[in-house]
Amino acid sequence: MAYEKFELELPLKCGVTLPAFLTYKTLGDPKNPAVMIPTCYTGRIAGTQTAFIGDDDAFSPKKYFVIVVGLLGGSESSSPSNQPAPFDGPNFPKTVYEDNIHAQFKLLKHLGVEKLFCYMGYSMGGQQAYHFATLYPDHVEKIIPMASSAQTSGFNWNFLEGVKSTMKASSDFMANTYTEPVKIGTTAFGRVYSNWALSYEWFKTKAWESAGYKSSEEYILNDWEKRLNTWDARDLLQMAVTWQEGDIAVYHDNDLPKALAAIRAEVLVMPSRTDQYFRWEESVEEVKHLKKGTLAIIESVWGHIAGGGAGTAEDNVWINQTIAEFLAK
C-alpha cells in the first residue's frame, strides 16, 4: 500500500531544524471523529494495532477517521536510514517525543483536524498519547495508553540500555561506521529483546503453540531474530533514545502526579499484567492522579506485546470490547 508523506521544517528540542517528513495512512471519512494511532518500537504502519482497526473492531473506519502515523526514527518517517544528507545515517539528530507530537499536530492541521476524538497508542505509542494530551490538552478528548507509561522508569531505561549495548558491541556495527546492514548486531538484539517482551508465564504455558509454532526457539527465530534483521541498527538506537527520555513530568516541575492531574482528556490506561518493563503497578499509580482515568488490566501471558494485539484472539476480543465501551461513554 502506498502511504502519504507530509513534509515540514521541524525545529527539534536538541536545537536542530530538521527538513522532516511524516509518513502516514488514513482510513475512513475525514468527516468522522478523528483518531490518531502512532507506530511504536519496531512497529511499522502496516502492522500497527491492526487487531483493533477494522469494520468489526473498536476503531472501525466506518465510524472513525483513523490516522496511522510513523514515529520519527521508525524507518518510515524521517529516520537515520532514510533522511537525505546532511542528516543521513550517523548524522541524524536526536529526536524526542516532544518533536514527534509537534510534527503530528502540524499533520493534523494539514488534514483539517482541529481536535482528535481519541489518541490511542501501544508501548512508545502510549507514551506519545500521554505527551499529546500534555502538550495539546485542548485538542484531544480521549487517550488510550496501552502497555505504556507516562514516564519511563529507571528499570525500563536500564533494560533499553542493555539492548542498546548489545547492538553497539557487535562486530558489524563497527562503532557506528557501518555501511552494510548490521546482521550480527540486530540478530543478537532481537534475541535479547524477545525475553523481555514476553513473560515467564509465556514460556511456562508454551504459549508459542497457540501462535502455530512447534517450539519457543522457532518462534523467537522467526518473530524476533529474523524480523529485527529487517531493521537498520541506527533506527533501532534512535527510537530507544526517544523511549528512554519519555517523561511528561518535565512539563510540570518534574512532578509526575502534577503532570498527570493536569491532563484534561479522558484516559483509559491498559497495561498488561505480565509486562516486564511497562509495569502494571505503574499504571495503577498513574490512574490515582488522573482526573478522568480508568484502569483496565489486560490479563494475558503474552507480556508486553499483548497490548499491541499480538496475544491470543481472546485477548483481542476483550481489548476491543473494553475500548469500544470507553469510546461510547
Image (cartoon, rainbow, N blue to C red):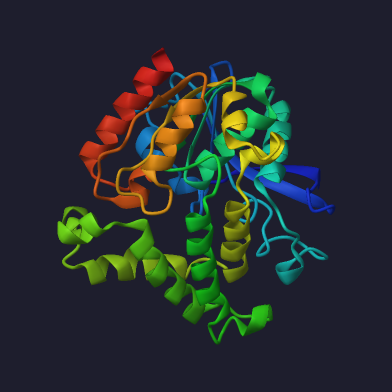
Q: Which is more toward the observer, 180 or 102?
A: 102
Determine which quarter of the picture holds residue 100.
top right
Image quarter hosting the C terminus:
top left
**Identity of the residue furthest to the top in this view:** 329
Q: Residue at x 79, y 53 (%)?
A: 14
Would you say 7 lies left or right of 134 here? right
Q: Residue at x 48, y 57 (%)?
A: 155
Determine which quarter of the picture holds residue 249.
top right
Q: Position of residue 177 (x, y in %)?
A: 69, 81
Q: Residue at x 26, y 31 (%)?
A: 318
Q: Position of residue 15 (x, y in %)?
A: 84, 52
Q: Which is more toward the observer, 30 or 75?
A: 75
Would you say 87 lies left or right of 98 here? right
Q: Which is more toward the observer, 182 or 94?
A: 94
Determine which quarter of the picture holds residue 50.
top left
Residue 82 appears in view? yes
Picture layout, residue 21 above or below residue 88: above
Q: Position of residue 81 (x, y in %)?
A: 65, 65
Residue 56 appears in view? no
Q: Position of residue 220 (x, y in %)?
A: 31, 67
